[in-house]
Image (cartoon, rainbow, N blue to C red):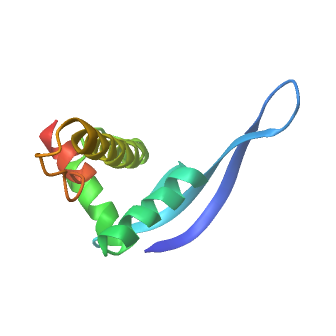
């Protein structure tokens, strides 16, 4: 559960002054432990999308990432989880396409491997 958005840190490109990225620091509960994570909105939105696709709460998803992380930084672990999740989905979709065109007798994968499992296998 997200408790609040603490503050927004933004960076601008030196030449144009345009917003390059925005990091939002959020307080979250993982089990009974309160902590904060600093993530770009794209990663936060993707994390919420993954949790919804899997039918779990955001707190449950964060707890799973926290349990299986291989880095000391939770924000980095979340970014890697999101990257691995969508990378695995993309590879699975490519393999489905290849198996349909190259090997019609081989059944395509029904679901991609969960990124959480991919992190645990490292």
Quarter that holds the N terminus: bottom left
In the orientation shown, which residue stands out farthest toward the top? Answer: 15
Whether residue 21 is situated above or below residue 3 in the rendered picture? above
Instruction: Answer yes or no: is residue 33 visible.
Output: no
Relative depth, front residue between 20 and 53: 53
As drawn, the residue found furthest toward the right would be 16
Count of residue discs = 0
x and y percent of residue 29 in the render?
Answer: 38, 70
Query: Residue 79's x, y, as percent?
Result: 42, 44
Residue 93 x, y percent position in the rendering: 33, 47
Seen at 48% across and 71% down, the residue is 2
On screen, residue 116 above or below 57: above
Asked whether the viewer can see residue 24, the reply is yes
Above or below: residue 14 compared with residue 28: above
Left or right of 101? Residue 50 is right
Q: In what quadrant of the picture does the C terminus appear? A: top left
In the image, what residue occupies the spot 43% across and 47% down? 75
């Amino acid at each position: 559960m997200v408790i609040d958005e603490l503050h927004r840190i933004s960076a601008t490109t030196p030449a144009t002054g345009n917003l390059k990225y925005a990091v939002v620091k959020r307080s979250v509960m993982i089990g009974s432990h309160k902590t904060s994570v600093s993530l770009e909105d794209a990663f936060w939105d993707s994390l919420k999308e993954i949790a919804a696709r899997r039918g779990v709460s955001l707190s449950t998803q964060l707890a799973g990432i926290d349990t299986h992380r291989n880095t000391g930084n939770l924000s980095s672990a979340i970014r890697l989880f999101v990257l691995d999740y969508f990378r695995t989905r993309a590879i699975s979709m490519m393999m489905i396409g290849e198996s349909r065109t190259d090997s019609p007798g081989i059944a395509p994968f029904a679901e991609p491997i969960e990124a959480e499992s991919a992190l645990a296998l490292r």
